Amino acid sequence: MAGEISFIEAKSTAEKKRFVELAFRLNRADPVWVPPLRDEVMGLITPGKNPWFGHGHAAFFLARRDGKDVGRISAQVDHLWATMPAEQGGGPGIGNFGMFEAEDAAVGAALIAHAEAWLRAEGMTRALGPISISIWDEPGLLVHGHDHSPTVMMGHNKPIYQSWIEAAGYTKIKDLITYDLDITKPFPPLIQRIVASGERNPRITVRMVDKKKFAEEASLILSLLNDAWSGNWGFVPLTDDEIAYAGKKLKPIVFNELIRIAEVEGEPVAFMMTLPDINEMQMDLDGKLFPFGFIKLLWRLNGGFSGKPTVGTVRVPLMGVKRSLQATRLASQLAFIMIEYIRAASVEHFGASRAEIGWVLEDNQGMVSIAHAIDSTMNRTYRIYDKAL
């Protein structure tokens, strides 16, 4: 008979390593699970490394039974979340849980209850999750699309977790959708005409980023993001420190041809960021960069002996148009031009055949319409849950 479940808060480096390592043991048998880079996860949960801790605080709990780690969960309070309007999912008293892994239903229920108790002690009155640990990291629980591997910077979890979270009294508040697209095919004739019309417009310029000036380019892109997404549900603005941190993390996996900035009369007004799916490149690294994983990954990113990187899949994690232009014909035109330029570059320069777009809020009609217009199909759904504490 299984013993009593107890908890420790992972505070020391050794305890946090156990927190990270548990996901490997519980998911190793899943053939489509992609081992995350251990150093990346350690950085995510470590104050002083992740600038999220400049506006939030968190606790990381390990569940123990019979002398063994059998589950984990984070509980966190993002102080910027409290400043969001209620219609965007914010307001005072809202905390989050995330990074949920459990060996069985009893452990799962105990972990959720333990995280809720911590949130109540912090004065929280509602819990939203899973958020691991920021809306910009891995938000939502995968509830559809467990049959294929996640792309870069997207989460993956066991299907059974849905029933465990719902059994704890959580109900859906928002779904986040990803879309799958065959990029070897040209877009429908209507989209091609829209793109051609934009190319004839002398006011419009669409350029590649300059990786040699990537810190500056990343700052521009993420500033556009803060403006473009500011009305979205779940939006939490990126701070200056987070923008610098994101730029530093993204630079090694950025290709100039896959990130575009659209300008109107010389003013940057829109962007589209596309990343190679490095999950394909790191699947066999077992989450270890050292001693040889870093060399393998760098070799693959640089294209090996040919010097020409090849990827099967690319992902569009971020795309936005300034709020002042949203819901206009020009905004749609800029989006389609950037999508077409990146589609063509992905195939021509990197041999890609597939793209994943998202995540997209289920009720973001503009982005949903764009996804449908280019003949993409829904392939994964991530769900965020809500519960009164």
Image (cartoon, helix red, strand yellow):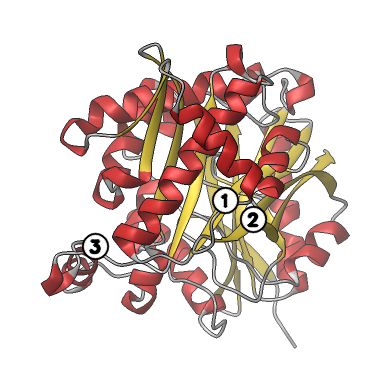
Label 3 or label 2, whichever comes before in sequence order: 2
Q: Secondary structure at mark 1?
A: strand
Say which residue label 2 marks: 179
Q: Residue furthest left?
A: 305
Q: Residue furthest bottom?
A: 1
Q: Counting other residues with Cα less than 10 Å from the Cα at mark 2, is it few (<14), some (14-19), or many (20 or more)? A: many
Is residue 14 visible from the viewing direction of this image? no
Pinpoint residue 135: horizontal percent, then vertical percent. 58, 39
CA distance separating discs 3 and 1: 21 Å
Pinpoint residue 313: horizontal percent, then vertical percent. 45, 64
Placement of the C terminus among the 4 image quadrants? top right
Note whether 238 is above or below 346 in the view shown: above
Instruction: Check whether the beta carbons of the residues at disc 3 and disc 2 lie within 8 A of each other.
Output: no
Is residue 153 visible from the viewing direction of this image? yes
Say which residue label 1 marks: 357
Q: How many numbered callouts?
A: 3
Say which residue label 3 marks: 301
Instruction: Check whether the beta carbons of the residues at disc 1 and disc 2 lie within 8 A of each other.
Output: yes
Q: Counting other residues with Cα less than 10 Å from the Cα at mark 1, is it few (<14), some (14-19), or many (20 or more)? A: many
Kindly identify the amino acid type of the residue bearing the numbered disc 3: Leu
Kindly identify the amino acid type of the residue bearing the numbered disc 2: Tyr
Between 239 and 94, the residue placed more toward the observer is: 239
Give the residue at x 16% y 69%: 295
